Amino acid sequence: MTVHEIDRLCHRVSHDPAFLASLHADPAGVLAGLPLSAGERRDLLAGDVLALHRRGAHPVLLVRLATHRVFGLTPQLYGRRISAPGPLLEVIMTMPDVSPDRVLWRNGEFIPWHEATVHVNAIGHASVSAAFEGVHSYWSPARGQLLGFRFREHMKRLHDSLRLSRLVPAFDPDELVEAAAELLTRVSEPGKDVYVRPWGFAAGLHREQMVAAGAPAEIVIDSWDFTSKLGQGRTCTLAVSSWPRTNHSASPATMKVFSNYHNGRLGNAEARQRGADWPVFINDRGEVTESSGACLAMVRDGVLCFPDLASGVLDSVTRDTMRVLAAEAGIPVQIRRIERTELYLADEVMLLGTAAEVLPATEIDGFPIGSGKQGPVAQELETRYHDLVRGAVTTHEQWLTPVKA
Ligand SMILES: Cc1ncc(COP(=O)(O)O)c(C=O)c1O
């Protein structure tokens, strides 16, 4: 069985530039040197991706032939061939065959169907089959360089969220780390911090939400400048949301998918209406979970406590960082179930996350917390986090991705 040879060839196309160049120069000659059957060589040279798929080749690897324009393929041709004659993946990979005269209604106007486009950044937000990440890169004055923070862990989580959504990403986490670092070399400016937004969604045009399992995922990495608030002594107020956290066993919080954020929006709007900055969600067992875009920690009797994953929280990268930094500072850490009333009695409560960084709370549901300023544990963690992400210390180099100027 040589189907593995076809898959291996597709893999080499995107990883071995010399091999790709030789395939472009002499496709038949290269195939003649590989252990393939005559039929497989014929289908490859014809760019017949449907026949190759029927031989057992993986469509997500085959798509690389189109991306790199091998055997006369283009992404459009790939889409047309892979989905003909039957909807193999129940996905339309290209614009469907719609008459140029057809119109649709948009914002009070009838406009040509083909012109009713959205920017690629808008698709996932309107889709139930999209996952995303929020990642920071910090300018390091000490090193004169931008440093990506925990890129590998974020890209792995994106990959996992897509896999749990049964979408198939064509790039592995290491390739995504490389892509993000390369993007930053192109868009970043000396002295500026950059937010990185990788996200993935079912490729192609879908006409219903029940996107078939196994559909390939398209991945986009966007970025924009942000201003870190570390070291400014910020605080916030919290309100327990009357909307419970979405049931973890119905839509797991460990999947960072856009559709999970509707619950966050409801709690967020309510908190603002009640005059607080951020919501805290309780699960249906009455346990504390997290906020709408950050995880939560509390300090009781000198112990830094986080809700456990079974409470229904995102497996936060910042939480993991803080767990390590706290241990290094000699602060005991517990990961356990937290009751709502414990928050009201806590010495410190803080939100932690890529975007929130370290954000201590001074009040929750009208109960004052601590002295109304940053507590000592939050202060210690913030200082250590600041030094780490800005490259002032070299204790966790494996978490930093230096970005070439
Ligand atoms: C719901 C939720 N919980 C927790 C977090 C914190 O996760 P991380 O530390 O990986 O940024 C986020 C951040 O995006 C979030 O949206």
Image (cartoon, grey):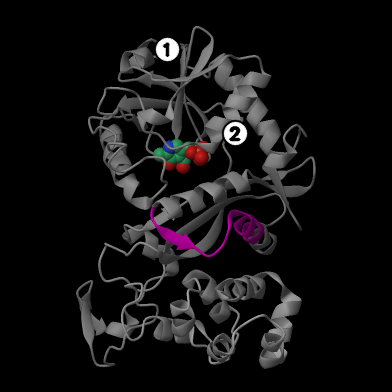
Q: Which residue is mark 1?
A: 346
Which quadrant would the N terminus be assigned to in this image? bottom right
Inspect the image, locate mark 2, and give the three-letter code of the amino acid beneath it: Leu
Q: Which residue is mark 2?
A: 230
Inspect the image, locate mark 1, and give the three-letter code of the amino acid beneath it: Ala
User: Which residue occupies the extreme top position in the image?
Assistant: 301
Task: Answer with the quarter of the image where residue 18 lies.
Answer: bottom right
Residue sitting at 27 percent across and 62 percent down? 210
From this view, report whether residue 91 is shown above or below residue 85. Answer: above
Q: Is residue 153 magenta?
A: no
Magenta residues span: 165-180
**Residue 392 x, y percent position in the rendering:** 76, 34
Residue sitting at 66 percent across and 72 percent down? 12
**Residue 324 x, y percent position in the rendering:** 63, 26
Q: Which mark is residue 252?
A: none
Q: Inspect this view and state whether residue 266 appears.
A: yes
Residue sitting at 59 percent across and 54 percent down? 173
In this picture, residue 186 sits left or right of residue 84: right
